[in-house]
Image (spheres, rainbow, N blue to C red):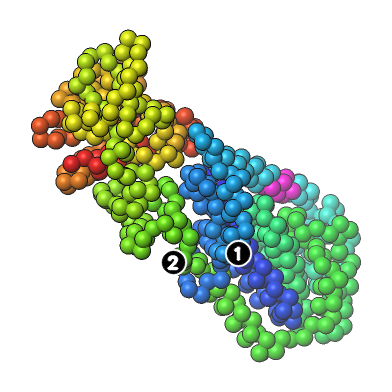
Amino acid sequence: MDRIFLKVLNMSIAAGWLILAVIVVRLLLGKAPRRMICVLWAVVAVRLLCPFFPESAFSLIPSSETIRAEVVRYASEPFIDSGIPGLNEAVNPIIGERFAPEPGASVNPLYIWTAVAGMVWIAGAALMMVYALACSLRLHAAVREAVPLEIHAGTRGAASPKMCDMVTSPFILGIIRPHIYLPSGMQEEQIPYILAHEQAHIKRLDHCAKPLGWLLLSVYWFHPLVWAAYALFCRDLELACDEKAAGSLDLNGRKAYAHALLACSLQRKTVFSYPLAFGEVGVRERVNSILQYRKPAGWLVAAVVLVCVAVVVFFLTDPKERADDSKIRYMDQWYSRDTLSAETIEWLEWYNSLSEEEQLAVSSIPHDLYDLAGYGGGPGMVETVDAEADLGVEAVRTEDESDDTARTKEAGEETTVDIRELSDDFGIALQLPDNENWIRDREYRQPAENTVEVYYWDMIAEADCRLTAVRDGELNLNEPDTVYDAALEETWMGSTVSGQIVYVKVQRSGDGKKVLATWEYSSGQHQYQFAIQAEVQLPVENADISPVPKTALTMIGYME
């Protein structure tokens, strides 16, 4: 849900720039035909509806993804990418300081706030839709006793007018089969003008466009510019229909039309009701527009067409990725470009262009990224344990120990052991990702002579994990009560330094809370079996289990 909310939020930010542009164009082209201004509002609707747009160097949208889901969930220093460098420099230090996760925290504070905001967003959208449904049901109940307007037989059909005692102003109700409803007691000489206006709405499909506008407003209710756009859109719908209905009338006809408009104006004017009510909004503006109406000049129409084309080109496209972005992503982490070489940046751009399956086949990374990610840095970064120690001796390395030593426990006593000396006996280096934003609280144990266990906390998956490595033996996972769902089984592929392909079998329990990743590796002299057992703490719908097999692939990538 949080990813959906972030997508909607980013779409609303991008559409906000388009809405501002349309408002400016609307002010500058005050004499332009309103039907053409409505085309611009249709462009806004497309921007709000479509999640993806082609990239263009001409795009004036500063950023199509201001708030990135990966940053919200994983970044140690959250930031935004507004596309405006000055704004980024002013805001990002505040965001990074205020929402940086505390040491040892299992989740980013910004991720929690985003999840809460997503629930509030859903609740607000539901209220908007319930309100629209209630208005619709109330109006259908009110017009149940409406009778056809017989004196205007030429208007019979799907849009045939009806008279009703329960309505106070004309409006259209219905989408598939719209009907025009008029209040009883209306003066007969006003009816032709009112019907001309309402039938113009129907011919323009405004009875479909306005509910769509309300639907978009319900989705983007949190954005003030969307409310402004809806209000102006409703106003322009009325002005466009006035132009169509009264454009062919002479001055006396336009005066009579304006008089009918004044007579039908609502006592309480609102643009947020469901029906397309005649006299609904901007009565004074509409009367002035009707009385002063002049057929627009050809040059003005041509200018508006060019403006519409320009708006589509500039605002219905996304900006191309800028080469000077301050950060670049590798897996689930973001790194400053200033700390990377040009070759590494080029490699990352290539890597990020690959599909997820293709990325899994990549087994080597540039050295400077290797060090920054916490995977390398010399012998002290190798995490190994002696498997040849006596049975009953438990070797433990925790976050508080140095990289070169571990504590062993025997008969209640603790001694210090050099980890690097222990690795040769086991014959393989058990090297987990050393990124503190990913793997924490490592503890190494030796329950048997040929078995090593590593207990750790996966920050990204938010899971308690146990890695078991067995040399020349069988795995004993001790999971009698766990049943894995065959339908959720996956296979991941990794590659060792020598190019040996290793397949990782990933299984998940039916409730989605437990994950098991298993694989085998042959070093020539010995056969090794591995298993990572993870118990996810997040709700199933929010859980991301991919870090579990990615840990396995990282280990495989450092094997010979």
Q: Is residue 118 above or below residue 457?
A: below
Sequence-first disc among 2 and 1: 1
- Evaluate if marks 2 and 1 touch, with contact meaning CB atoms under 8 Å apart: no
Which residue range is magenta in the image? 128-137
Where, quadrant-wise, is the C terminus in this rendering?
top left
* Quadrant in the picture for residue 252: bottom right
Residue 104, horizontal then vertical, whole percent: 50, 33
Q: Residue at x 58, y 44 (%)?
A: 99
- Residue 166 shows in the view: yes
Q: Is residue 390 above or below residue 556?
A: above
* Quadrant in the picture for residue 310: bottom right
Q: Residue at x 81, y 73 (%)?
A: 286
Left or right of residue 443, residue 95 in this image: right
* Count of numbered marks: 2
Residue 69, horizontal then vertical, whole percent: 50, 49
- Residue that carries the numbered disc 2 in the rendered image: 323
359 or 161: nearer the viewer? 359
What is the number of the mark on residue 86?
1
Q: CA distance from mark 2 to mark 1?
A: 17 Å
Amino acid found under the numbered disc labelled 2: Ala
> Mark 2: which secondary structure?
loop
Q: Crowdedness of circle 1 by 10 Å Cα count: few (<14), some, many (20+)?
A: few
